[in-house]
Image: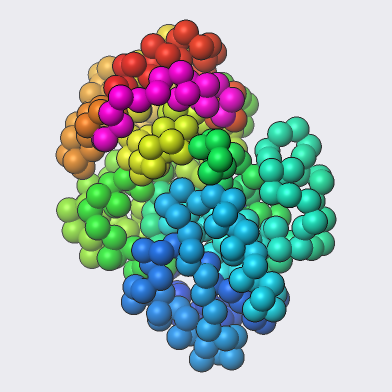
Amino acid sequence: MSLTANWSYPTAIRFGAGRIVEIADACAAAGIKKPLLVTDRGLADMDITARTLDLLEAAGLGRAIFADVDPNPNEKNAAAGVQAFKDGGHDGVVAFGGGSGLDLGKLVAFLAGQTRPLWDFEDIGDWWTRADADAIAPIVAVPTTAGTGSEVGRASVITNSETAEKKIIFHPKFLPSVVICDPELTVGMPKFITAGTGLDAFAHCVEAFCSPHYHPMSQGIALEGMRLVKENLPRAYADGTDIEARANMMSAAAMGATAFQKGLGAIHALSHPIGAIYHTHHGTTNAVCMPAVLQFNKPAISDVIAQAANYLGIDGGFDGFCNYVDDLNASLGIPKTLTALGVTDPDIDRIVAGALIDPSTGGNPIEMTKDNTTKLLLACI
């Protein structure tokens, strides 16, 4: 079976090895004539970035890059990116990279034409309607990891550097016009990034599948996304040049982000404040928190997880699934606790307060009160 396709769900996706060569055509399809490529510092000097810039330049689209992006991007990065966009006279963004580059790139395209401050567009109620939708620049997204799925998302996760809180900035037009999913771009990922990003995709699928909200389409996508991770993440981790495994993981990442329209939960509610305060890798933090969150939610999810286990070929129902998660984490070098991850002497009250106001909390199968969230966090430490 050929792992090359053009999809139109949830946006236009050009999927397949080597399809980065279509970057100029993708910009044309999005109506971009002078793009600003936004990525993170780690990718700025890598060959895949240089090649993409070469392709843009050769097509007469210029060679402009903004890479002042932190691993957990913040409002300062956003302001600098918007300034670079305006100074360069750009008319669109190529969001390039993992979650940080993709999220910041989408935000730059969104903010460049707005007159209100960033935090006025937080994902609260109908705040997104405050934006001038006609002023949002077009976006082409190019993921270089297989984890966040931000390339098919309608939001960006941005850290408030003053409060160390992660905020979700939402607008329907955050969804890129065109996505290029080229698994060859993920070949150079180090093992720990392959593991952490892959388990981020898995966490998206698990939490979406367990969310109590009604969304059968997301339910099916989440289940198949779990299967793709189960069958392909160990392969991609063992052999980074396994293009079939890399391609299937790139699909799983997009599927996870599509599925979590149904909701996330306590894994992300904890991971967001931990990452904002202690600058841990998001996907790895999710993986560390997942076993404790599964046990926390057991009274509400044991049956649905047993269904997932059956589909995935895992014996033992809920307990068997939990054992599988423990074994998968161990096989990928994931620390067993937040302490082992480097979160020493954590500010428990601050993390819990952040978790309780995180939008992900609303998708958790069991209500997260201050007391039981504190107990859950202690189980992760």
Q: Which residues are magenta?
A: 341-358
From what the image shows, is residue 313 above or below residue 230? Answer: above
Q: Quadrant of the N terminus?
A: bottom left
Residue 91 location, x and y as percent? 70, 74
Question: Is residue 2 in the magenta section?
Answer: no
From what the image shows, is residue 353 above or below residue 181? Answer: above
Main secondary structure type of the part rendered in magenta: helix
Q: Depth check: give the residue in front, 254 or 128.
A: 128
Left or right of 77, for residue 253: left
Q: How many marks?
A: 0
- The residue sitting at 69% across, 72% down in the picture is 86
- The residue sitting at 63% across, 49% down in the picture is 154
Q: Quadrant of residue 136?
A: bottom right
Q: Quadrant of the C terminus?
A: top left
Residue 197 location, x and y as percent? 36, 48
Q: Quadrant of residue 339?
A: top left
Q: Is residue 291 visible?
A: no
